[in-house]
Image (cartoon, rainbow, N blue to C red):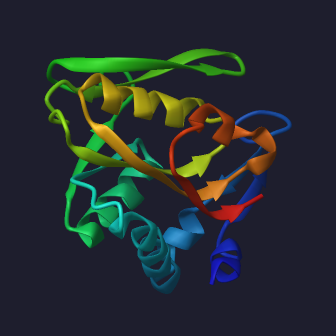
Amino acid sequence: MTADLESKIRDIPDFPKQGIVFKDIMPLLADAEAFHATIDLLAEFGESRKPDLVLGAEARGFMLGGALAYKLGCGFVAARKPGKLPWETVSAEYALEYGVDSLELHADAIRAGARVLVHDDLLATGGTARAKVELVEQLGGEVVGLAFVIELAFLNGREKLEGYDVHSLIQY
């Protein structure tokens, strides 16, 4: 089934900058069967972990993360770029190849002891995923797993997530 999903992912060369091949999941999301299969496969990983919440980061992590939370019967929390949330926040920084960025979460989004499944469409270098883990743990939550649609294994992102249960549907 993952081969079918892979056929719905479009490569866009030199985006967002020269030398990067962007993995565009929009065709996958537009195909009802592929979208449903993606959520079902991610939920298979998440079900046994019994999450209270799914945490997704903007923007593709919102689209899939909300659907995944619905399928798992749990809540959804959104990690956003700085300045996008209207209330008190906590933040975590992560390195980019050209600088530093950060994500924020409402300070009351995760209660102490909550079981959190971290989700995103893509695991690349692991910096963004690691920042999401840090946000969960700052608020006293427990990361019960990380679920990705795509993993760019050649970038070794799993190394930044050592000690956590990491799952991806498609590896490049």
Give the answer, above or below, for where 138 lies relative to 113. above
Task: Examine the rendering and report whether any part of residue 111 can be seen.
Answer: yes
Residue at left 35%, top 60%?
Answer: 49
Q: Nearer the viewer, residue 120 or 160?
A: 160
Count of all numbered marks drawn on residues in the image: 0
Give the answer, above or below, for where 93 lies relative to 77. above
Q: In which quadrant of the rendered image does the N terminus lie?
A: bottom right
Task: Examine the rendering and report whether any part of residue 14 can be seen.
Answer: no
Residue at left 44%, top 51%?
Answer: 145
Point out the residue furthest to the front here. 163
Q: In which quadrant of the rendered image does the C terminus lie?
A: bottom right
Q: Quadrant of residue 154?
A: top right
Measuring from the top left, give residue 157's x and y in whole percent.
Answer: 67, 39
Residue at left 63%, top 58%?
Answer: 150
Measuring from the top left, give residue 20's x and y in whole percent.
Answer: 79, 40
Q: Nearer the viewer, residue 23 or 128?
A: 128
Q: Nearer the viewer, residue 121 or 108?
A: 108
For residue 17, side relative to residue 27 (left or right): right
For residue 153, side relative to residue 90 (left or right): right
Give the answer, above or below, for where 111 lies relative to 37. above
Residue at left 67%, top 67%?
Answer: 9
Measuring from the top left, give residue 85's x and y in whole percent.
Answer: 23, 27
Measuring from the top left, give residue 26's x and y in whole percent.
Answer: 55, 63
For residue 40, side relative to residue 164 (left or right): left
Point out the residue furthest to the right here. 19
For residue 154, side relative to residue 112 (left or right): right
Give the answer, above or below, for where 107 lies relative to 31. above
